[in-house]
Amino acid sequence: MRPRALIVLAILSSFFSSASAQSVPNSGAPVQTPAASKFHINLQRLQGTLEKLSEFGRNPEGGVTRLAYSETELPAREYVIGLMKQAGLEVRTDAAANIFGRRAGSENLPVLLFGSHIDSVLKGGNFDGDVGSLGAIEVINALNQGAVKTRHPLEVVIWMNEEGNHFGVGTMGSGIAAGLIGSEILERKDEQGLTVADWLRRYGQDPAHLTDARIARGALASYLELHIEQGPNLDEAKVPIGVVQGIVGLNRWRCVATGFANHAGTTPMDRRKDALAAASRDLLAVREVVRAEKGRQVGTVGYVKAEPGAVNVIPGRVEFPIELRDLDAAKIERMWDQVQQKLKQIDKEENVETRCTEFDNVTAARTDPSIQAAIREAAKSLGLATMDLPSGAVHDAQQMAKLAPFGMIFVPSRDGISHSPKEFTSWPDVANGAEVLYRSLLLVDAR
Ligand SMILES: [Zn+2]
């Protein structure tokens, strides 16, 4: 074991018996947790910056609309760049408009990258992305305050257009950095007829150099992201820290049930080929199959389009998608086999024919077991309980998985609400997440 690791373990072991930082409802004012004296990060400072950031693009409901590539986001980026400079980071913006802030390490090693995003969805909230972004900058402030040196260089990253509400492509900046999105994206137009290239120019970048934003293989030691859960698991179980097992994969099929459109008044019930009746049973079959398995897998039929769509005609053709998500590709395959069997049976009984073709297939990205262990250890050193869980939502970390081992820390979302002005994480939970990020980072750095 390296001396650095010994020091970190010694520091952490002194916290093993410390009291748990309890969640208390938000009062609007900075809240000191019982274990606050043992915290390296400063909640008051972090809360102050989060509240200031929430002013950029604030909507009447109290959330924000701060789309990527917008006149609203630009000053928010300037604000965050200012915070990074104040924290002593060497700031650069890459050709995809991702923002990086670097803090030197003591050894010649690849970078420990961590951060999140500050763009929002239309009518979004104040925590999605913001907590991980400003939490990362707060970690740098805490390291500076303690004069802590790391072996690896540290870089805080603010990814461009994670939400993808603008241009319809999510995790755009990290996708470009991972080399999965190329210069074909530049000509993509928004509703105003402006292209990604136009906006990059507005953001001070030269679109001709877009692929310079690619991060070379081997450049990163690992990637860490703190994020709100965006689901109800932690909040319901009153567990403050989620250890993300991975970001789920998904498969999507487009299905068409074909029956026969005929007169609704004259066709006897036993002679119908009602495609909508079949599709209705199909979507319930999807739910039944997904619910029959243990675990957190999900399955959805997002819409049905019935044709011809008249009150007096039996639907002859129905189109609907089926989406299945899980961390385990074998489970998705198994569920799909069962769904297909059920659809076949329903076809027979309803006298229709249903065909499904796959149109989307995203493989799951599993987090690194040793980073998971570091997060658990960091939480334990604070007396905080953890829960292992998958991320059902897409994150930039999924793109970084192509380049380096990665880990994600989740903090609770009240009532599981996100992408809404009602999105809320209590300040003690925000503090816990940032402190766990601080400690996890040092553990990862030491190994
Ligand atoms: Zn997010």
Image: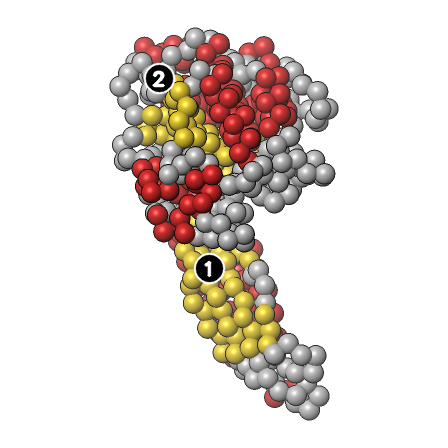
Outermost residue on the bottom side: it is 266
Above or below 18: residue 196: below
Q: Which colour scheme is used?
A: secondary structure
Which class describes the residues within 10 Å of circle 2: few (<14), some (14-19), or many (20+)?
some
Q: Is residue 154 left or right of residue 415?
A: left
Comes first in the chain, label 2 or label 1: 2
**Screen quadrant of the C terminus:** top left
The amino acid at mark 2 is Ala
Distance, label 2 to label 1, CA atoms, is 44 Å
The residue nearer to you, when weighing 398 against 282, is 398
Q: Residue at x 37, y 25 (%)?
A: 112
Q: In this view, does 219 lie to the left or right of 285?
A: left
Q: In this view, does 154 lie to the left or right of 82?
A: left
Q: Looking at the rendering, which quadrant does residue 111 occupy?
A: top left
State the SS at label 1: strand
**Residue 225 shows in this picture:** no
Task: Please state the horizontal and vertical placement of residue 400, each as a whole percent of the image.
Answer: 38, 38
Above or below 368: residue 358: below
Q: Residue at x 59, y 84 (%)?
A: 261
Q: Looking at the rendering, which quadrant does residue 234 occupy?
A: top right
The residue nearer to you, when weighing 327 against 167, is 167
**Screen quadrant of the N terminus:** top left
Give the residue at mark 2: 104
The amino acid at mark 1 is Arg
Give the residue at mark 1: 252
Q: Which mark is residue 137?
A: none
